[in-house]
Amino acid sequence: MARDDPLLIVDAEGVVVRWSARAATLFGRRAEDVLGRQAADLLRDRRVAPASADRLQVPPGLTVGAETGEDGSVVWAVRASSGGEGQTDGAALEALFRESPVGLFVLDADLRLVRVNQAGRAMSTVAVEEILGLTLSEILAPAEPEPVDRMVREALPGRLSRDTLLRVRAGPEQAPTTVLSLASFRLEDAGGQAIGVAISATDVTCQDRIRTRLRVADAVRDRVGTTLDVVTTCQELADTVVPEFADIVVVDVVESVVCGEDPPLGQTARTTPLRRAAFRGRDSAWTHDDAFAAPAYPVGDVRSMPARTPFAQSLVDLRPRLISVRPDAPWLAAEPERAEVLRAWDARSLIVTPLALHGGVLGLVSFYRVAGTPAYVEEDVDTALSLASRAAVCVDNARRFTREHTVAATLQRRLLPPGPTTGIALETAHLHLLGTEGGGGWFDTIALSGSRTALVIGEVAGRGIQAAATMGQLRTAIRSLAALDFEPDDLLARLNDIALFLADERADLPSGDPLHRRRLTASCLYAVYDPFTLRCTVACAGHPGPLIIEPDGAVHRPDLHRGPVLGTEGGTPFATSSLRLAEGSVLALHSAAMPVSASASARAGVLESLSSVLADPSRPLAELCDEVLYTLREPVERGDAVLLLARTRPFPADRVASWELDCDSRAPEAARAHARRQLRAWRVPADTAYETELITSELVTNAVLYGAPEVSLRLINSPPRLTCEVHDSGGAAPRLRHARAGDEGGRGLFIVSQLAPAWGVRYTDDGKAVWTEQHYEQPAADR
């Protein structure tokens, strides 16, 4: 047909009598749907041009003229404008519809298709002869029709859209395989009235896959490695890449790596046991079934990879593999369990890549895609390798932390008391939970002279081996200072000097050493309980104060002076606080990480909870510590959670005896007589009793000669220890010296030191006490 032939002809009755192929292409209507119909009906449908030029407006680019028909009647012929801008626009429109690789869809005012180009037809899942008159969502069959329908509806009043991504199906029952980028345009007549919508669709599947790979890579960098736990890191990887990069992910890790050991080399890794560390299947919304099948081996299962499989080979040569999963693949015969599960999954594509770092094998990652999802291509292998490399770094960091944490925990256990101590006047128990970033918490119970007991709790800032080593140094220093019977505030002052000395040693380390820039600080609480006065003297160095649980179940936290942390130069002096503990009370010392030191808003509830757990006098303290552990709601993450419980007991009255002595020459003889009678009543062995009489005589003699009134003697029998104390009001401490052969005196303390394994001087508010401690075996009848 010539270019100037009419597009369509309308007779005098207004009926369409001719409809050319160009008209069908231009207006999107077939000839059989138009011929014989009234042009006015077509006008109301707005699917063809008006039929009368004298009463209806002619669309731009078209002309209407009267002509003589074949039978001599007058007809109206509609032609494309010749020449000028209209002809150019029409030619451009025709070329666009004929040649453009972009899909073009023209919808009328009812939002139904009236024209589509060849590229648009190729994007449709509907047959060509049935496409006209359908909606856009019916033509493209998107996975989610609502966004498409909304975009088309909003375009008609003028709310246009650009770069709207749409996932379409390759078939009615298939999962999304193609990604289109849609843009909408409002179509108007010469008067500016909306007559339809034009939609352009560009296939951006390749670009979307690239964006997906980049998005997954960014997500792995952000979400994987948030903890220093090997298994958690593997599960983070699986959760991050599903479902955007894989339908199913399985992560297997070398068993020794989970324990923190060095990874094996690739050549020796084939027979190395691997633990199934993580598994993730796609969400139910992405599957045809309500739930997804479980893996062949459960998470936590440990086994070696069978030989002659891509998994074992990837462990050996450390290369990724892209595999098309076929039911008859020979490697599936080596693992019937895996083959059965892969058939249940309907897996079609697999990428297996090692978790490797510096030639060492940390594990293996398997990425699966099932039917309905595009199979992996070579470009995806590079992405899988990049994801696995990032995950390998995180897994190795977690492995190193696990190893350091294990070593630090072992060192810390060796430096702490092996178990609770129970004495005549005090029962103790403890709870120690290592934090994931801890390693510096400690506690101790120290037996002091006079049947007193020191309770210690503290925490070194930092984590790992260095914190545990510093903790051991401070604990040893405290034990050495406690043996000198310092008051709690004096002991903390000297302990602070030791902490400053250790800090100076850190500062002298090479600048490249991490400890060189790390400040040494520690908190500590030191308490001394005296069973005879029922007093507990406490000093704090930046540590939380204790809780006191009364025998009736009341719980309170005393108001104590809290001094600076250890390692502080020029801080305020340490001070002591004296607490009276009734018999049967429980003293609870805890670290800052223990949840009993909750926020102020929750403190009342915490105290009430501790009251219900700790205030039962009929239960052993060890059971109470377990009960506290069971009630913890959150895991310990920072620092160590330490709880030290001490329950006071009445000191048996028949186990202690004291006498006031005259400060004269008869005092030693009277002291020996008192001691002799009391030791006989306690059925102390004769040799020990004789030695105690000599010790008593020498100590009382020194008190009379060099001390000041008043002088008293006290014997404490707490088998297997026997304590002798001589008190006087003088402030001068006795000094051990070795007398020369001609000296008549000076041998008293030397004799005492030979008879008693331990002796010392303890200062009190009204003088001093010189004490000795002996050990003896209690008769079987008295045990």
Image (cartoon, rainbow, N blue to C red):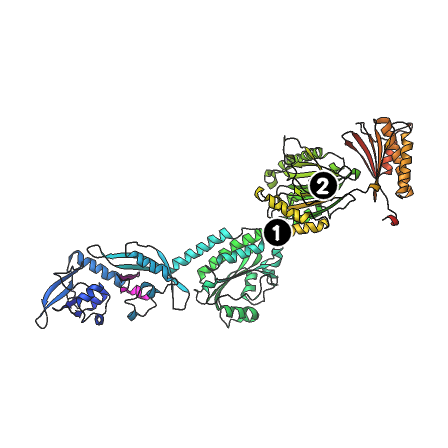
Q: Is residue 167 above or below residue 546?
A: below
Per the image, label 2 sits on a secondary structure element best described as strand
On screen, residue 282 versus residue 23, left or right, reads right
- Neighbour class for label 2 at 10 Å: few (<14), some, many (≥20)? many
- Neighbour class for label 1 at 10 Å: few (<14), some, many (≥20)? many
Q: Is residue 417 visible?
A: yes
Looking at the rendered structure, the kind of residue marked 1 is Thr
Front position among marks 2 and 1: 2
Q: Name the residue beneath numbered marker 2.
A: 455
Where residue 381 sits: x, y (%)? Answer: 47, 60
Q: Name the residue beneath numbered marker 1.
A: 402
Q: Is residue 357 visible?
A: no
State which region is magenta: 100-126
* Residue 116 is inside the magenta segment: yes
Per the image, label 1 sits on a secondary structure element best described as helix
Q: Residue at x 7, y 71 (%)?
A: 72
Earlier sequence position, callout 2 versus callout 1: 1
Q: Is residue 341 above or below residue 517?
A: below
In three-dimensional space, the C-alpha distance between marks 2 and 1, rounded to whole angstroms, equals 31 Å
On screen, residue 381 versus residue 72, left or right, reads right
